[in-house]
Structures are given as C-alpha cells and as structure tokens.
C-alpha cells in the first residue's frame, strides 16, 4: 500500500497496523525522518523493543543469519525492529519469504535509494495490503522553509528572509543538507541570536555571483568557457568538497530517474514537465541538454566515481583541491566532447 510521507507524519498511530515498511527515494533526510517516526511509534507502543540494523550485503553474505533474526524471539524485548539499509531487488525473495510467514513479533523497516517502477521490491510493497510503501522525493521550497523556521526558532536565532532563502538554496532540496547548514549557523552564533546575510554567506562558503549549482550545471553540460570562468574564482576560496560532490550526486540521480522514465516514453519534454519534485522553468533547458549528453551507463559510472573522489579527498587533505577539480574538469571535458 502506498502512503505518502506527509500522511505518515499526520497519522502516526495508523502505523501500528503494519509490520512491513519500505521507504525509498533520493531524499536522504526525509527517509531518516520517516524511519525515526516508524521506530518511535513502535517503541512508544511497546517499551521493550530490540532494534537491529543490517545492510543488504550482510544479508546476502549470510542469509541464514537473517532468517534466524527474523524468526527467533528477541533476547532483549518482546518485539524486534529489523532495519535494512540500501535494499534492492537482490533481497526480494528473502523479504517475500518472511512476509509470507508474517511473524507478529518483528517489524521490518527497509530503506532504498531510487527504485524504478518495474522494481520487484517496490511493486510488492505497493500492492500488498499489509505493507506500507513510502516514496521520498526531494523537498519542496515550502517544506524546507518550515523546517528552517522550526529549527531556528527552537534555538532562538533570527535570520533575514534573504539568509533563510540562501540556506534553502544551498540545501539542494534535501532537508538533511539544510539541517547541516543550520547546525553551522547554531555553532557560529553562540550567544549572538541575530545574524545578517553577509555572515551567512561567509559561513556557507558562498562564492559571489557564482553558486555551486551553476558550477555543477556548467560542468555536466560541458560548457568549458563558463566552467573555467567559475573554477578560477572557486579555486581561490574554501571549498566544501563533500557537499559539492553530494550535490553533483543528487543531480545525477535526478538525471538517472528521468532517463529511466524516458525508456517507457518517447516525449522527454513531457517527463521533464511532470517530474516530482518539479524542475524550475529556468533549469529545464539545462536538464534537457544534460539528458542529451549523458546516457544511463555513464551516469551510473559517475556515481561510483563520486564516491571514490570523496574518499580520496578525505584521505589526502593536502592535495584534496587538486583531486576535486581534476575530477570535475574530466567530467566537463567529456561532456564537451559528446555535445
């Protein structure tokens, strides 16, 4: 059964009717929130709940251990929550087996990245009546504004509207990123409860008129002239490598999602116009160009390279700028050659 994320947040008590939950999508922060809501509702109903976290690879490496955990009683409580991270169709049979026996003493909370419409796992959780399937799309501006308002008010911090908008823009439509930026603001503010826009710009490494999003868009579009113009200014400032790589990853995930939908439709403009969350009209030509440049295999390969680059930057902080900009330059050159 499909239940939207806002419905879960509004009707938490209804969750107790179910034992099997699938939370999937590109919004990491929203997935964390939904997972926490489900866990809290169960724990509030039953005090002695054991919580176990597993990754898909652990299940595939030792399936018997997974079945033992699912079917055996808890050593520490009357109920057991098994949280499965990074799940794909590779463990569909194991999940289906456990569901068919439907042990009442366990709850399965399964988290996945983007799942295609043809995904067995997604179809199973959408169609079965005793399961909950919750897609987690990127946050809209209103959602992010509400989160920012609540977090700032909680810490008695006042920011001008322009500063809040800047934090929201920096979040790249993910509440996890937004909360991380707000944590910086809280740490910086100390006893100072009113900050101005210039302090916020400095705090989040805002680089003049050239924003991170423009840098990444020019890179993926292969616009070498504009890319070089931006990179010359960025190189002189402080760069948050991890944040920029994750923004790049989010953009590639979005392109992948559109590409996969395009496999079943000949009209790419229709897909761009009906995307959720919606693509702003100014960005549609850029997205269309990037879709024409990058194919599915290249996009998937880029995701793996992003992880490797992030790891190399962390392991080699002295040369992290060189590693980071070399990686982006190679992407831009490749896009330019294709276009």
Image (cartoon, grey):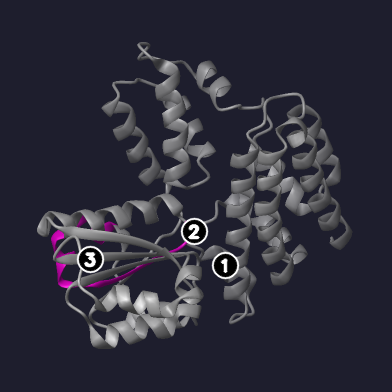
Residue drawn 54% across and 55% down? Answer: 279
Q: Is residue 338 above or below residue 70?
A: above
Of pointers 2 and 3, the one earlier in the residue sequence? 2
Q: Is residue 326 above or below residue 78?
A: above
125 or 141, nearer to the observer: 125
Residue drawn 24% across and 57% down? Answer: 39
Residue drawn 71% across and 64% down? Answer: 301
Of pointers 1 and 3, the one earlier in the residue sequence? 3
Task: From the top left corner, tell me how far across and down residue 166 is, in percent.
Answer: 51, 31
Of pointers 1 and 2, the one earlier in the residue sequence? 2
Could you tell me how far apart the alpha carbons at marks 1 and 3 are, in whole angstroms? 34 Å
Residue drawn 80% across and 37% down? Answer: 322
Q: Is residue 274 above or below residue 29?
A: below
Identify the magenta region. 6-26
Could you tell me how far apart the alpha carbons at marks 2 and 3 are, in whole angstroms? 27 Å
In the picture, the disc for residue 257 is: 1
| Side (left or right) of 145 relative to 40 | right
Element at badge 3?
Answer: strand
In front of the other: label 1 or label 2? 2
Q: Which image quadrant for residue 324?
A: top right
Number of residues whose C-alpha sits closer than 10 Å to that of mark 1, classed few (under 14), some (14–19) or many (20 or more)? some
Q: Are marks 1 and 2 in contact (CB under 8 Å)?
A: yes
In front of the other: label 1 or label 3? 3
Number of residues whose C-alpha sits closer than 10 Å to that of mark 2, classed few (under 14), some (14–19) or many (20 or more)? many
Q: Which residue is mark 3?
A: 80
Q: Which image quadrant for residue 201?
A: top right
263 or 99, nearer to the observer: 99
Q: Is residue 114 above or below residue 247?
A: below
Q: Which residue is mark 2?
A: 26
């Amino acid at each position: 059964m499909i239940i939207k994320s806002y419905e879960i947040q509004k009707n938490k008590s209804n969750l107790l009717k179910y034992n099997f939950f699938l939370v999937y999508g590109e919004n990491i922060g929203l997935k964390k929130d939904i997972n926490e809501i489900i866990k809290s509702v169960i724990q509030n109903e039953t005090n002695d709940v054991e919580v176990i976290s597993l990754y898909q690879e652990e299940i595939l490496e030792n399936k018997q251990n997974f079945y033992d955990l699912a079917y055996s009683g808890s050593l520490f409580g009357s109920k057991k929550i098994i949280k499965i991270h990074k799940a794909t169709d590779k463990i569909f049979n194991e999940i289906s087996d456990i569901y068919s026996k439907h042990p009442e003493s366990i709850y399965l909370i399964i988290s996945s990245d983007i799942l295609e419409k043809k995904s067995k796992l997604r179809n199973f959780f959408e169609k079965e009546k005793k399961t909950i399937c919750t897609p987690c799309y990127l946050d809209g501006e209103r959602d992010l504004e509400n989160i920012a308002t609540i977090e700032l008010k909680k810490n008695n911090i006042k920011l001008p509207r322009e500063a809040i908008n800047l934090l929201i823009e920096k979040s790249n439509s993910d509440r996890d990123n937004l909360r991380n930026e707000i944590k910086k603001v809280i740490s910086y503010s100390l006893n100072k409860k009113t900050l101005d826009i210039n302090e916020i710009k400095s705090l989040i490494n805002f680089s003049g008129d050239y924003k991170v999003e423009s840098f990444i868009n020019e890179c993926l579009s292969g616009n070498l002239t504009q890319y070089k113009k931006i990179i010359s200014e960025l190189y002189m400032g402080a760069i948050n490598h991890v944040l920029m790589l994750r923004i790049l990853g989010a953009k590639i995930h979005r392109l992948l999602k559109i590409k996969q939908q395009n496999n079943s439709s000949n009209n790419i403009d229709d897909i761009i116009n009906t995307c959720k969350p919606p693509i702003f009209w100014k960005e549609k030509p850029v997205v269309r160009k990037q879709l024409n440049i990058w194919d599915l295999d290249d996009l998937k390969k880029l995701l793996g390279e992003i992880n490797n680059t992030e790891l190399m930057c962390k392991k080699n902080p002295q040369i992290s700028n060189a590693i980071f900009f070399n990686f982006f330059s190679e992407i831009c050159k490749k896009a330019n050659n294709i276009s």
